[in-house]
Amino acid sequence: MAAKEPAPQKDYLIEPSFNAKFRSGRAQEIITEVLKTKLTGVTYHADNTSTWTREIADDIKLKLKELDVERYKFVVQVVIGEQRGEGVRMGCRCFWDPNTDSYATAEFSNGSIFCVAAAFGVYLY
């Protein structure tokens, strides 16, 4: 009776390589580009904001996926409001690994609206 050969072991990467990490600088460029494209020349109307936020978030997520960073999940948050001269603060808390996970934000405003978008890249272990 011949001895069975052991099954080949699969390598499992715990962290992405340096070149395969989420780059917040490139993500910020993508967010800024999408915001300018979608919101330049737009005036605030409350009925349109839910559609705009959904479209902007979907466009940002789609372009982030084109970066082709494997095993990353993207979460995109977009806030649009009417420009009335008041201050607005946006905050977020996350529990993540600072070695692999990151985020990027960008803002857009004109005389009528303001928009803040944040994208989070979270590595799936």
Image (spheres, rainbow, N blue to C red):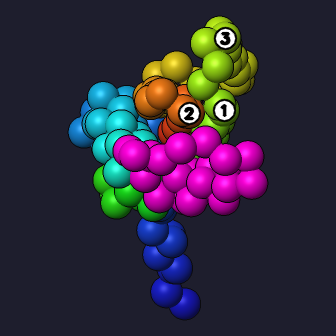
Residue wearing tag 2: 113
Element assignment for label 2: strand
Looking at the image, residue 88 lies above or below residue 70: above
Q: CA distance from mark 1 to mark 3?
A: 10 Å
First-in-chain label (3 vs 2): 3
Residue 93 found in image quarter: top right
In x, y percent, where is residue 87?
A: 65, 9
Q: Is residue 21 left or right of residue 2?
A: left
Residue wearing tag 1: 81
Magenta run includes residue 87: no
In x, y percent, where is residue 34?
A: 38, 48
Q: Is residue 110 left or right of residue 75?
A: left
Marker disc for residue 86? 3
Q: Are marks 2 and 1 in contact (CB under 8 Å)?
A: yes
Q: Amino acid at mark 2?
A: Ile
Q: Which residues are magenta?
A: 38-59
